[in-house]
């Protein structure tokens, strides 16, 4: 498995507080330019499409204000992975065509400097110790009244909700994989309030123990864990 590492340069060393919308706009522009067919499949407004990718940003020395994120440098990194290797290749080519082009945002702009590939660690054990690179969002959705409840690592329902989110994800992308032995245990969890697509919700960062069969862990490693993964949440690195 492979992930992509993108380095961006900013005109001004800051990002809007809802920078997830900026990243999504950049991804859409890249894919629409390179593969209109994939753009229509992923981002058409006729139906909600579950994505098989996830991403996270490294924002150096970030300081958050009410509407902006001040950075310690005018560069930031984006890490992107996908369980669909064919789709990952399309994203790689699409991103590559965006290099050195000015991408405008409100009162600022950014430019993609480089796109590199990095081989992901081979999973050989059914138990992993992982560190969240972006917040894990555990969400229970009530379809009757279209409301959501978000769970944090210190709540007793947390593990079950994450497992239920995983089952729904696998079902929506038509992948059959045994989840009976899946579990997630917080080792050094931390609650954060995170912003996703204009809404503040409870999220979880820190270190966790994840258990499952090898195939399931490979899926999680590339696609992320929890919900809102394609909006910049749920990506982790293996530390043991």
Image (cartoon, rainbow, N blue to C red):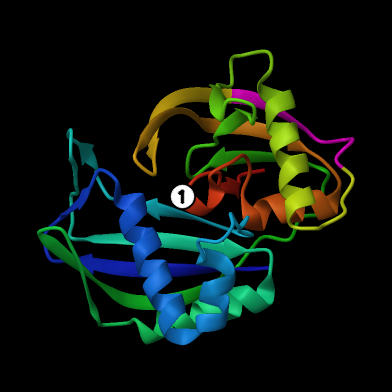
Provide residue 194's location: percent of width, then percent of height.
39, 33
| Viewer-closest of 138 and 120 | 138
Which residue is drawn at the image coordinates 9% and 59% (left, top)? 107
SS for callout 1: loop
Of the 4 image quadrants, the one containing the N terminus is: bottom right
Which residue is drawn at the image coordinates 83% and 44% (left, top)? 126
Q: Where is mark 1, residue-wise?
A: 232
Q: Which residues are magenta?
A: 179-187
Q: Quadrant of residue 174?
A: bottom right
Provide residue 81's location: percent of width, then percent of height.
57, 63
Q: Is the residue 92 above or below the residue 64 in the image?
A: below
Q: Is residue 34 magenta?
A: no
Q: Quadrant of residue 144?
A: top right
| Viewer-closest of 161 and 9 | 161
Of the 4 image quadrants, the one containing the C terminus is: top right
Provide residue 86's location: percent of width, then percent of height.
66, 78
| Viewer-closest of 61 and 150 | 150
Tell me if mark 1 has few (under 14), some (14-19) or many (20+) residues whose alpha carbon lies within 10 angstroms of its own.
many
Q: Is residue 185 magenta?
A: yes
Q: Is residue 140 left or right of residue 113?
A: right
């Amino acid at each position: 498995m492979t992930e992509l590492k993108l380095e961006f340069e900013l005109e001004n060393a800051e990002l809007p507080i809802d920078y997830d919308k900026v990243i999504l706009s950049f991804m859409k522009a890249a894919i629409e330019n390179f593969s209109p067919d994939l753009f229509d499949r992923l981002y058409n407004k006729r139906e909600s499409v579950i994505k098989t990718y996830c991403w996270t940003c490294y924002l150096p020395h970030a300081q958050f204000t009410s509407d902006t994120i001040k950075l310690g440098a005018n560069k930031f990194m984006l890490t992107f992975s996908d369980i669909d290797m064919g789709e990952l290749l399309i994203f790689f080519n699409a991103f590559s065509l965006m290099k050195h082009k000015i991408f405008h945002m409100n009162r600022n702009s950014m430019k993609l400097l480089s796109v590199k590939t990095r081989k992901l660690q081979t999973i050989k054990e059914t138990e992993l110790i992982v560190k969240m690179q972006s917040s894990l969002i555990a969400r229970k959705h009530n379809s009757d009244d279209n409301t959501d409840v978000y769970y944090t690592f210190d709540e007793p329902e947390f593990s079950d909700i994450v497992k239920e989110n995983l089952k729904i994800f696998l079902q929506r992308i038509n992948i059959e994989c045994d989840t009976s032995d899946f579990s997630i245990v917080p080792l050094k969890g931390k609650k954060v309030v995170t912003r996703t697509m204009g809404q503040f919700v409870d999220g979880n960062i820190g270190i966790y123990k994840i258990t499952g069969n090898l195939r399931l862990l490979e899926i999680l490693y590339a696609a992320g864990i929890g919900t809102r993964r394609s909006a910049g949440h749920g990506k982790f690195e293996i530390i043991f």
